[in-house]
Amino acid sequence: MRKNRVAAIDVGTTKVCTIMADVSGNGGSPRVLGVGVAPSAGLQKGLVVNIDEAKESIRESVRKAERSAGYKLESAYVGITGRHVSSVNNRGVVSISRGDRLVRPEDLRRVLEIARSVRVPSDQKLLHVIPRSYKVDGQEGIKNPVGMHGFRLDVEAHIVTAAVTSIQNLTKCIRGVGVEIDDLVLESLASAEAVLTEEERQTGVLLADIGGGTTDICVIKDDTIYHTSILPVAGYQITRDVAMGLGLSFELAEEMKKRYGNVMPFAEEGKEEEEDKKVTADGHSVSYHDLSEIIRIRVEELIRLIVLELPHGDYAKLIPAGIVLTGGSANLPGIAELTEAMTRLPARVGTPINMYGVSDTLRDPAYATGVGLLLWKAKKQQGMQSWQDKHGVRDFLSRLFGRVTK
């Protein structure tokens, strides 16, 4: 039973979410046993800025999940984000010199070792090496070349690196509450597991996970990673603009945004008369029009920044399936409609799917990363294809910190 237990910890700028589940049934889909959500402290834009505060937030989240699940959490998959994370695509090539010219798993390991040999700054370490596609003797589009015959094997891999100090700080916080880290996963890749359909992955789609401190972006096409990036702009900036523009405290601005915020409040006919309506919270009254206008302007800017992150300008050809918005800030009413109007591409809000058990609270874009971490782990445990490289390339945690045996 224990080997079927999985867990995920999403340490965000606004909340820490711990999910405990098992994958013994439902075709590998996690059955949620416990959920713990706690307000986040000690983090800014995905980075730990106060270890003690961050540790207490994580401890409270883990405690709530353990209480719900009824057993102690020993290890978990953890999401990572922040501007310290960077990515690049790189190629590798090897010759198949054996007499039978048969591609074997060791050849995949060799070619990935070459692809991962990019120049990494001394303060950065490899996080993921994800094969995008292989070529055998020039034949393109091969997903798994093992068993094929050829003289030459090429690979194009997506390589993600992260700052060593940032990883150390996050690791220290989580291990400080008695939880071991199974693996670190880039948050946008985890969210993609939770909210994207198979058709979107194949056709070409951009996922934007708009959290509290960062917006995590990944482009997926032909069911593989095309591009990843992280913007230091998200829900915090929207709330800050509301606070400054309307003369409110940050906490009150956040409450106003969540309770009344609408990106396109007057898009429907006959709504113009609502422009002078007042909305109230904690005895403060503000103009509904002014509140929504500030939010809309900031969201428009964010959408432009997201589109600018695309590797090339012909985004209609690159992502014909459009844009999927997830994360807590994707709950703003009208955000998908505004995205469609600005980009002329399909847009929708992505909510985690295929969850069982005590998972009602998780059916919300804000929990896409946490659910995605579980699905990442579950797919690896079931031996199914995942974004992560399956051919022996692990993240650097075990080498950097060593595995603590229990």
Image (cartoon, helix red, strand yellow):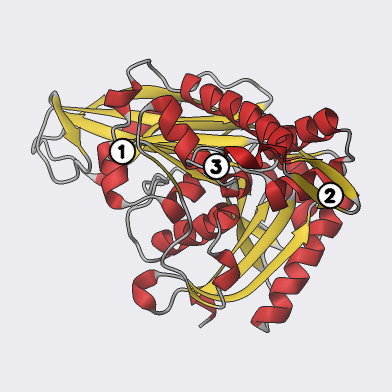
> Residue 214's spot in the image, x, y percent?
65, 36
The total of numbered circles placed on residues is 3
User: Element at badge 3?
Assistant: strand
- Name the kind of residue labelled 3 in the image: Asp
Please name which of the two marks, 2 or 1, marks the residue nearer to the observer. Answer: 1
- Name the kind of residue labelled 2 in the image: Ala
Label 2 close to label 1 by CB (< 8 Å): no
Instruction: Report which residue position mark 2 lands on.
Output: 41
Q: Residue at x 31, y 38 (%)?
A: 321
Query: Which label is found at residue 321?
Result: 1
- Name the kind of residue labelled 1 in the image: Ala
> Residue 379's spot in the image, x, y percent?
40, 60
Q: Relative to 138, is 133 above or below?
A: below
Instruction: Report which residue position mark 3 lands on.
Output: 209
Instruction: Name the image quarter holding residue 298.
Output: top right
Q: Relative to 199, is 154 above or below?
A: above
Residue 228 visible here: yes
> Which tag, 2 or 1, sits closer to the chain's start?
2
Q: Tell me how far mark 2 sits from mark 3, CA to CA.
A: 20 Å
Badge 2 density bin: few <14, some 14–19, many ≥20, Cα 10 Å: many
Q: Tell me how far mark 1 sits from mark 3, CA to CA.
A: 16 Å
Q: Which residue is drawn at 49% across and 34% down?
A: 338
